[in-house]
Amino acid sequence: MKIIQNGSAGTLESSDILIQVNPNKSKGINIHIDSVVKKQFGDEIRQLIIKTLQTLEVDCCEVSVIDKGALDFAIVSRLQSALFKGAGVDMNICWEEL
Amino acid sequence: MAFEVKDISYNIENEIESVTSLLEKHNLKLDSFVEKTIGVYEQDLLIATGSIAGNTLRSICIDEEYRGTSVINTLVSHLLNLLYDLSCTHFFIYTGVDAYRSFIKLGFHLVIKLESGIVLMENKANGIQDYLKEIKNITSNRETCEKPIIGSIVINGNPFTNGHRHLIDLAKEHCDLIYIFVVWEENSVFPNEVRYRLIEEGISDLNGIVLCKGENYIISSATFPTYFLKDVSESVQQHAILDLTIFRDIIAPYLGITKRFIGEERLCETTNIYNQTMIKLMEGSPITVTEIKRKESDNEIISASHVRRYIKENKWSEIKKVVPKTTYDFLNSKGAEPIIAKISNSSSRH
């Protein structure tokens, strides 16, 4: 999937995560994480983001997250939403298969 | 707690009134230049408000009774989504020191904290440091003497005139290296890229100059929004202090700048307040401010605003006397046509 525009999803509410996805001017993936549990789970959050990007075949983008203690499934669904918005896809997403 | 977020309409008197009275209750005000304002309500009672001006969040206030609750998360989430919708990915918050810790938890990072308690924050960690690092990288390729005297000039250049060139020539006599920061906001009739290029062409015969973009950190929507307004308000000095403190305490030390050059300002009150604030703020710091007399042509000081007036009045022979050939050629080129049309039809100061 190619990220062609800015996409964002989520909120700053407790237990949620606000994710912003932008096209990357240079190649590759750039991830910036701001989290209330960065020291304990920063690495895990990063791995989860990378895995989700791989599953959706996104190899070039900038991801910026402000995490307020979201659980894995919340991180993944917010990221998927932001990525689809960034790719300009809004129809016929088969959510169950993701 | 169920909160409702609504866009405030500037045309509906009681909506604006509830916003301004909430702000006044906490000794804040609604900046006149904000573009969007939202309100957070609990059952029709306004309990929080925040606004956007350019890429900066301002006039933010949460009623005391609701501090420490999720109201701030709701308010800021909504404001950030508005910014994202405008494709704004690098943004700032102008707020008071009381709110500083709350915004740290929302992913903001400090740019600067003023003695007055005003705080500017941005959503990028090391935003200003990265900006300065990039400028220093350009400079490291330049050959200079061992301990160069480094000066600076901030230019809008709307358009670049012989007056600007005069200031640069004078600065060169006192410095080994000069940073010229180009004001980078799309609020002037000559677009950013054009102003940059005209300056670049106008100084192409000189060396020892590093031309860079002021971007978000010098005379920008974040640091000095009132610079671009027609009416001079009390905010001008407040914003000037913010802009100049960032220059004095962060930009100048990082780049080794010890001199700043400005032209005497007799026409524009905003710029004059800025210049006088600069002279005062730099006292006692390693930075000397040199205010030079403006270059004159036919006994009139050269100024970009005069050039814009001549353009409006079609006085091309006057224009030729006060701008370098590079600017004059551009003004006569096809590329300048939309700009000239805009000037001819406008009544704005910029």
Image: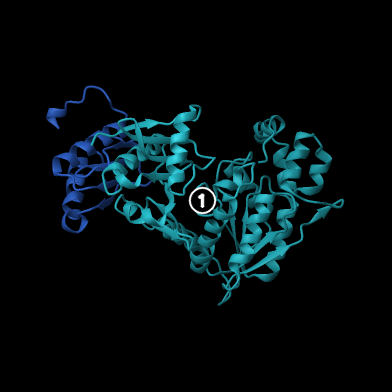
Where does the N terminus of chain B fall, quadrant-wise? top left
**Chain A: colour as depicted:** blue
Q: Position of residue B48 (x, y in %)?
A: 36, 40
Q: Amino acid at mark 1?
A: Glu
Q: Which residue shows up at 62% across the image and 66% down it? A: B280
Q: Which residue shows up at 68% across the image and 45% down it? A: B159
Q: Residue at label 1?
A: B215
Question: Considering the numbered disc 1 on the image, is that residue within a helix, a strand or a loop?
Answer: loop
Q: Position of residue B261 (x, y in %)?
A: 66, 63
**Which class describes the residues within 10 Å of circle 1: few (<14), some (14-19), or many (20+)?**
some
Where does the C terminus of chain B fall, quadrant-wise? top right
Q: Position of residue B194 (x, y in %)?
A: 61, 43
Q: Is residue B314 left or right of residue A67?
A: right
Q: Which chain is cyan?
A: B
Judge whether residue A63 can be spotted in this image: no
Q: Is residue B1 left or right of residue A27?
A: left
Looking at the picture, tell me which residue is in the foreground, B41 or A68.
B41
Q: Position of residue B349 (x, y in %)?
A: 68, 40
Label 1 resides on the chain identified as B
Judge whether residue B271 can be spotted in this image: yes
Looking at the picture, tell me which residue is in the foreground, B147 or B349.
B349
Looking at the picture, tell me which residue is in the foreground, A30 or B40.
B40
Which residue is farthest left? A96
Which residue is farthest bottom? B146
Say how the picture is coloured. by chain
Q: Which residue shows up at 72% across the image and 44% down it? A: B305
Which quadrant holds residue B19?
top left
Q: Is residue B145 left or right of residue A46?
A: right
Q: Which residue shows up at 55% across the image and 66% down it? A: B142
